[in-house]
Structures are given as C-alpha cells and as structure tokens.
Amino acid sequence: MARAHVEDLHYRDVPLAEAADGPFAGAPWRVLSRDEETGALTALAELPAGYAVDQRLDRGYELLVLDGGLTLDGEAVGAGRYAYVPTGESARVEAAGPTRALIVIGAPGAGGGERIVVDPESMQWMVRVTEARTDTGFTEPILHVVKILRRDPVSGDVSGFSALPAGMGQVTAEWHDPADEGFMLRGDMIVLGPDGEPAEMVVGTYNWRPENARHLPKYTHTGNLRFFRATGGGFDGTVTVTYVDEPRWPQLLAAYQARFPFFGEQAS
C-alpha cells in the first residue's frame, strides 16, 4: 500500500519500536511513513549510547543527525550533518552517545551514486522566484530558498534543506508529479491538510505528500527550516506544478495570524 498523505504528524505521536531488520536492525525508532510494497520508509531513530551495527546494504539510505553524534566507518557525523550510503556498500555505524537521527531508507536496489557526508552549514543557499498562475488568471510570486544536499544520479530524487522567511507563504494550492516529504527542524508553518482543514507544523512535524496530491497554501509567522525530499526530481525547472485558487485561505490565515503579536512571544 502506498504511503498516506499526512501534513502534521509529530514524531512524538508515533510509538517507539525496535527495527526488526534492515540497515538499522535493533535500533529504537519511530516509523513516520512506510511503503508496504517496497519497504521504503522514513523514521526517526533514537539510538542509545553504544548502539552499533554492521551493515551490508541491499538498498541505499540517507540520514540527518538531529542531536548527539555517530560514526560511519569511523568518520564522525555530528549534529546537523547529512550522510548518504549507496546500495551495495558495507558500513559500520556506531552511536557515540544518545543520538537522534532522521533516516530515509529506499526500496530494494535503490540508491545510486557515491557515499557522502555533508555539513549543510558549509553550503550556500540557492534562491529562485517562480510565478504561480491559476486558471482564473490570479498570479503570485513563489519564493524558493533551498540547499540541495544530494541528487540521486539514477532516480533523480532530491534531498535538501528549505527555508521560508518570517511572514511569508503562498496563497495558492498546488500539486505536482513528484511525491515529497519534509521534517520541520525550526520554526512554524500552517498549511491545509488532506481533509481541507488547517494543519499546523512545528518543530518535529513530518509530512508526506503522494504524487499529484493537492497541498498547501502555507504561511509561517516566525520563519522555518525544513529537511525535504522530492522523488523523481525537482528544483531543476523540469517539474510541472499546477496551481489553483483556495478561496477559504484568507479567513483561515487571518485566524492563525491573530494568535501572534506583531512584536514578542505568542500568547500561551
């Protein structure tokens, strides 16, 4: 069964379980989404100090260390670092101390290219503005601020960071061919959920949007930073996005904005 459309799944709302097999066998983790047909999944692992596993991979995986730190064949991967290990490789992973990491495991045989360990802080942001146009003739500029951490040479899948400045958003809804997923690292965002009702994203919130799933609009009060993935491509000008009007958004947005003062902290 394909993964369900979710916009505001917080990792703490997913039960902690032990990975029965795979590259992180024995690890305590929370599976945020899983493709039951291929076994591809995204999980948040909570590795205890001393956790270690020897991997022989029949599928590639990505990880983003959220806090703590681990080693990959002796190479340190600290908090905020991203790593990718392709299919067919062997690796030893050891947790230097209690460590939380976002882990993305592909389908069998998936995951081309070479192993990498990346410090996103050393990378520059890419900034691009595109135009959204609906069939009613409404237009709005769409701001894209991203760091591309990796693009798979076989599948075209893209992984990276995206940022949205405070007070910005998008008033149109959209859909596109690639499925995409994201995990909120900092900040806030309100979007429309798959049921058409407001869904709030805070630190630790995960989303999965299937291919051609209608999603957004969006708005952030404080600004945000997210880890994202897009299957089959994206951020290279080759993906067609369809934009549509969302008549209810102004009212929903006003209600969200009313909860925040112009200056100072949100009221409790």
Image (spheres, grey):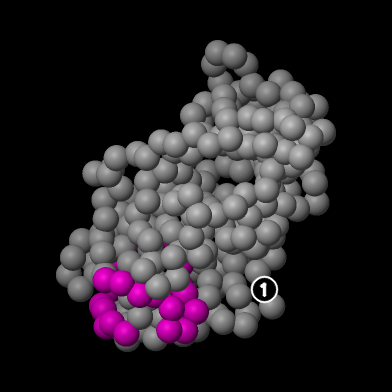
Q: Nearer the viewer, residue 67 or 215?
A: 215
Left or right relative to 15: residue 247: right
Left or right relative to 79: residue 227: right
Q: Badge 1 local density, few (<14 within 10 Å), some, or many (20+)?
A: few
**Is residue 205 covered in magenta?**
no
Q: Is residue 109 visible?
A: yes
Q: Which image quadrant for residue 127? A: top left
Residue 253 point in image, percent of width and height: 72, 28
Say which quadrant the C terminus sits in: top right
Residue found 67% across the figure and 30% down from its top: 139
Residue found 57% across the figure and 50% down from its top: 205
**Is residue 101 covered in magenta?**
yes
Look at label 1 and name its amino acid: Ala
Identify the magenta region.
Answer: 88-114
Q: Nearer the viewer, residue 243 or 168?
A: 243
Left or right relative to 148: residue 219: right
Residue found 20% across the figure and 73% down from its top: 73
Q: Nearer the viewer, residue 80 or 98?
A: 80
Left or right relative to 199: residue 180: left
Residue receiving disc 1: 2
Residue 234 point in image, percent of width and height: 49, 55
Say which quadrant the N terminus sits in: bottom right
Q: Is residue 102 above or below residue 61?
A: above
Q: Which image quadrant for residue 250? A: top right
